[in-house]
Amino acid sequence: MSHPVTTNPLIIMLINMTVVFLVLIALGVVINLIHYIDPTKPKAAPQEEAAPAVAEPVADPEPVVAAAPVEEGISPEVVAVIAAAVASMGYGAGSVRAIRPLERNNWKNSGRNALQSRG
Amino acid sequence: MELLNAFVVSLQAVWADSGFSAFTMGNGVMILVGLLLLYMAIVKEFEPLLLGPIAFGCVLANFPRTGFFTDPGLMQAIHYGIENEIFPPLIFLGIGAMTDFGPLLARPITLLLGAAAQIGVFVALVGAMLLGFTVQEAGAIGIIGGADGPTAIYLSIQMAPHLLGAIAVAAYSYMSLVPLIQPPVMKLLTTQKEREVAMEQLRPVTKFERVCFPIVAAIIISLLLPPIASLLGCLMLGNLFRESGVMDRLSDTAQNSLCNIVTIFLATGTGMTMNADDFLRTETLLIIGLGLVAFIAGTAGGVLFGKIMCRLSGWKINPLIGSAGVSAVPMAARVSQVVGMKAKPGNYLLMHAMGPNVAGVIGTAVAAGTMLAMLK
């Protein structure tokens, strides 16, 4: 409590607000830097985000999803759920190129193995 | 006869040693204040976890001849923890473990809203100095506007320990009243069109960013402002416990058991600083008034800066999230959400408001650090 730098309240306000803004701006720069050097960030995301900024924001998604080839036997509800899951991860609807069931039976085999190992 | 004399002398000795003989009117008034605060905590549910122990501490502090602050014991240990700034950083450790910095990392521009809302701190500081408080007292009073209890206590202990009780009560009372104080200011300063602005979904934040941020932020802020290194260091350490994914037990302890234990000590100890001599003064009323001014000015500062950002971003930022910059996590963010939903049902602002909300915690700590460096 010995020697304050100044006792003028307006100068204190001005200096302190400037310091608060500068420190938080510096933190913002650091956050952007961490994002920039992040080796784990998804690569495709920036391209997908850049496209709608040029084109019309609302009109695009539906035709793109409709254009993606969907094999017979997959209901529109499943298509919608997959598209929503992809969108929730930050990708545009245009990321869905095709929807088709896999031929592999990994899950079935895994379940059988689990049952057998119990016995 | 001898027996009767001995009995009377004993009774007189018991009376002379009892608290009743030293009980003053001031003690009585302060016990009533404590009971009023208990009523607000238990019946009205105003920040009960904090106001409850503060109120009971206030009642305890006004029993004469307890020797709480002179004789070794639990109460002196609690007082030691407050006087030597041990408890606020430990609370920040828990807050860090509870805080999700994701919204801030996804949209770092909202840091500016957390900075703008600190104007409330300095408006109250100017007001306090105009009312005759010293510059150190004004700084401690102003920090009420930061709406951050541990930081307010941390700064008060160092700059105006005799005002600690009044400042802590004002800070926690207004924090619980945020849903009443903020909406009128937010509505007054924004148009219907601004309140209806819908914000884009936040980008996903990777684990790399979540882990790097607390480490780098602790290094930078501690080097820039050493007076708050223990506060911000603990905040970031707690957050690292949470985000690392390999320290779940520590994260759990920091945000639950440890935080609860320290809250009991900090709040009770703060209440115990509310003795009649220090509290029953005109200054207490002025502090409570200035605290309200600080909250209103901070809310206004955040919203007005939000309006500027709304225009500059091409109507992509809803100015209502600016009010969350006053800290009071997460209540201020909830207020932004509620006001936004009233303006446009289905407009979810909560996650967007969490960015300025946690930025406000950092901003208030930075403001405290700057004042400690300049004014102490």
Image: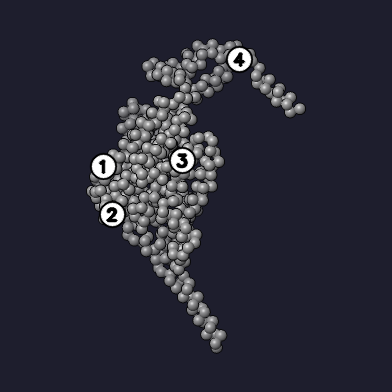
Given the image, on which type of amino acid does mark 3 rest? Answer: Leu
- Which residue is under mark 4? A101
Q: Look at the numbered discs 4 and 1 and tell me whether their residues touch, using CB distance below 8 Å.
A: no
At 50% from the left edge and 25% from the top edge, which residue is drawn?
A: A88
- Which residue is under mark 2? A2
**Upstream in sequence: badge 1 or badge 2:** 2
Chain ID, mark 3: B
Which of the 4 quarters of the picture holds residue B36? bottom left
**Upstream in sequence: badge 4 or badge 2:** 2
At 47% from the left edge and 36% from the top edge, which residue is drawn?
A: B100
Query: Marks 4 and 1, Cα distance to the nearest angstrom?
Result: 64 Å
Q: Where is residue B323 in the image (x, y as percent from the top left)?
A: 37, 39
Q: Can residue B41 be seen in this view?
A: no
Label at residue B178: none
Label 4 and label 1 in one chain? yes
Query: Marks 1 and 2, Cα distance to the nearest angstrom?
Result: 22 Å
Q: Is mark 2 on a helix, strand or loop?
A: loop
Label 1 vs label 2, nearer the camera:
2
**10 Å neighbourhood of mark 1: few (<14), some, or many (≥20)?**
few
At 66% from the left edge and 17% from the top edge, which residue is drawn?
A: A105
Chain ID, mark 1: A
Q: Is mark 1 on a helix, strand or loop?
A: helix
- Considering only vertical position in the picture, is B13 above or below B242? below
**10 Å neighbourhood of mark 4: few (<14), some, or many (≥20)?**
few
Given the image, on which type of amino acid does mark 1 rest? Answer: Leu
**10 Å neighbourhood of mark 2: few (<14), some, or many (≥20)?**
few
Q: Is mark 3 on a helix, strand or loop?
A: helix
Q: Where is residue B282 in the image (x, y as percent from the top left)?
A: 32, 59
Label at residue A14: 1
- Which residue is under mark 3? B237
Given the image, on which type of amino acid does mark 4 rest? Answer: Pro
Label 1 and label 2 in one chain? yes
